[in-house]
Amino acid sequence: QVQLVESGGGLVQAGGSLRLSCAASGASFSSYAMGWFRQAPGKEREFVVSISWSGATTYYADSVKGRFTISRDNAKNTVYLQMNRLKPEDTAVYYCATRATGVAASAPSAFRYWGQGTQVTVSS
């Protein structure tokens, strides 16, 4: 069993930055790929970014490329999402997820464990 706890969400003006954190416990975090997804009101959950177990491979959604950066610290069992140049359309609940393999992926169905989410609101 894996527990994931997100933090770092909040309200920010367009053009601002936030850094989300996801702390994992309960399993071999360093062996697992991690991902961030988001869900806006009335919309389906969508892929944002994922990272392999080593951090060597990352996949980004086109909508966030060049603005968001994922990283991980396996010693701290934590994955981070640095979000820069935020836009109002980035407003959503952001979820951290992990899968029981080290290979990064983009489909929500590929991820087994999910956090409770953290709200990010970007005002115009």
Image (cartoon, rainbow, N blue to C red):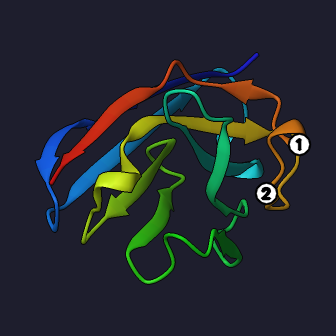
Q: Is residue 7 visible?
A: no
What crowding class fits label 1: few (fewer than 14 Cα within 10 Å), some (14-19), or many (20 or more)? Answer: some
Seen in the picture, residue 13 relative to 93 is either above or below; the reply is below
Q: Quadrant of residue 9?
A: top left
Q: Nearer the viewer, residue 8 or 10?
A: 10
Mark 1–mark 2 distance (CA, rounded to whole Å): 7 Å
Which residue corresponds to mark 2?
106
Residue found at x 50% / y 58%: 72
Residue 58: image location, x then y, percent: 66, 73
What crowding class fits label 2: few (fewer than 14 Cα within 10 Å), some (14-19), or many (20 or more)? Answer: many
Residue 28: image location, x then y, percent: 72, 37
The answer to whether mark 1 and mark 2 are in CB contact below 8 A is yes
Residue found at x 39% / y 54%: 89
Q: Nearer the viewer, residue 54 or 106?
A: 106
Q: Amino acid at mark 1?
A: Ala
Q: Nearer the viewer, residue 4 or 121?
A: 121
Which residue corresponds to mark 1?
110
Residue found at x 71% / y 76%: 57
Residue 92: image location, x then y, percent: 42, 38
Seen in the picture, residue 90 relative to 22 is either above or below; the reply is below
The quarter of the picture where the N terminus appears is: top right
